[in-house]
Image: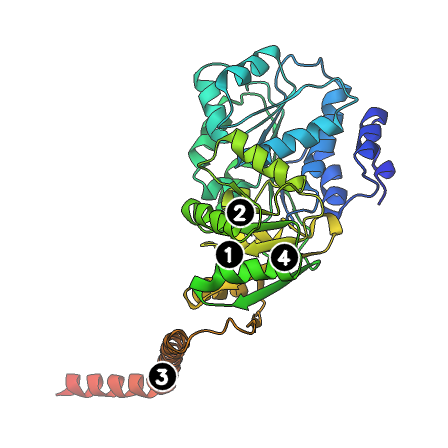
Amino acid sequence: MSVDTIGLSADLLKAVKACGYKNLTPIQQQAIPMIRSGADLLASAQTGTGKTAAFSLPILDALASNATPGQTIKALVLTPTRELAAQVADNMKAYSQFLPLKIGVVYGGGKMSSQTNILKQGLDVLVATPGRLIEHLTLRNIDLSQVKHLVLDEADRMLDMGFLTDIEKLMLVMKQKHQTLMFSATYSNKVKALANHILTTPKIIGVAKQNSTSGKVKQSVYWVSEVRKRELLSELIGVNNWQQVLVFAGTKESANILAKELKLDGIKAAICHGDKTQGARNKALTDFKEGKVRVLVATDVAARGLDIDNLSYVVNFHLPFLAEDYIHRVGRTGRAGRSGSAISLVSPKDEKFLENIEALIERKFERIIVPGYELKRDEAFEHQQVVDKRASKNRYRASQEKNQAIAKKSTSRTSPALAANKKYNTKNKKKR
């Protein structure tokens, strides 16, 4: 469906086309009419499918048609991370470049004084992370009483990060009756519970199978010893001449170590994680996008919110603790219908995490072994012991469940006779 067919105002349509949009994605086709109707919405779609435009375009169109610019905040978009907040704000500014609307963003790590100045000057739309927004509310730098549109972007991640209390506080200060939109790449029980609490007879959209990854992304698993992961990663990057690789590490410390070791291997790398200042994170991302560094080593702070054009490779140096985060990591590549590759380096200690991922996305991965990187004999033996123990435990459990079922079935079959015999004995006992 063409962007010309949905009836956007002339200035908004001009901006959308200037951004390179020609056709609507499935989530945009379904969500935009529902948002325009004024209904609350719970929408889930794979990451990279255009959720930001899906909620931004109808909101901006509505605000531009009957608004005095910058008087009060009328739309609030909450995101879990700084990177995602900055990205959403940039997109909304691009969409509204020909509209009389003011878009602002506040998040942790930015200067409070400059953010306060932006808020005092007046905004129509504010994009924010919950924690920093609460700080501004406490300081009375902001008034949310006139908000008409509330968007929770990546709602599941906000709940995982412990923002539920902050969200509830923010809901209390929004006195105006407003439309609430929840967008998420996954649809967890936490999200459903929050939706039941804050949404009023919502419309529900799911444009893709839940907890699935894009078919455009080729996913591979390389079976390797934990101590040789970095060596294999450097070889894959060098031999295959990969030029732009986003690598996810499990912790900030491991990210620092990995980036340092890659540099020793002659591979330029930058780091993005929570201990870095916002300025340092922005510079690392800019250098990565511009090709000044070959590898960006990140923690899950970058699993959502990083939108990098034509990113071809994502590598899981460590698998995520939560299987759902694998979907978001993989979603950094293969965006907007493009193809991409996601590689996971898996050692025996990662096997349980891999099994959780396979169960979530309902797919089994072939374990690829690169010649020269076979497990040592003691590692292979130790892993086989774990596998055998797990299989034995599963067989025992299956056998136990089978015996319980047989016993239950046997009891149900004999219960009428037992009941009759009991009745007979009771009757004779009374006669005696």
Residue that appears at 43% across and 18% down: 138
Under circle 1, the secondary element is loop
Give the quarter of the figure containing the N terminus. top right
Give the quarter of the figure containing the C terminus. bottom left
Name the foreground residue: 375 vs 4.
Answer: 375
Cβ–Cβ below 8 Å for labels 4 and 2?
A: no
Residue that appears at 45% across and 22% down: 135
Q: Which label belongs to residue 97?
A: none
Q: Which residue is mark 1?
A: 317
Q: Earlier in the sequence, mark 4 or mark 1?
A: 4
Residue 169's image quarter?
Answer: top left
Mark nearer the viewer, 1 or 3 = 1
Q: Residue furthest left?
A: 432
Under circle 4, the secondary element is loop
Q: CA distance from mark 3 to mark 2?
A: 51 Å
Q: CA distance from mark 2 to mark 1?
A: 9 Å
Q: CA distance from mark 1 to mark 3?
A: 43 Å
Residue that appears at 43% across and 68% down: 348
Q: Which residue is mark 2?
A: 297
Q: Earlier in the sequence, mark 1 or mark 3?
A: 1
Q: Which residue is mark 4?
A: 213
Mark nearer the viewer, 3 or 2 = 2
**Residue density around tag 3, few if under 14, some if 14–19, many if 20 or more, within 10 Å:** few
Q: Which residue is mark 3?
A: 403
- Residue 103 location (% of width, % of height): 66, 22
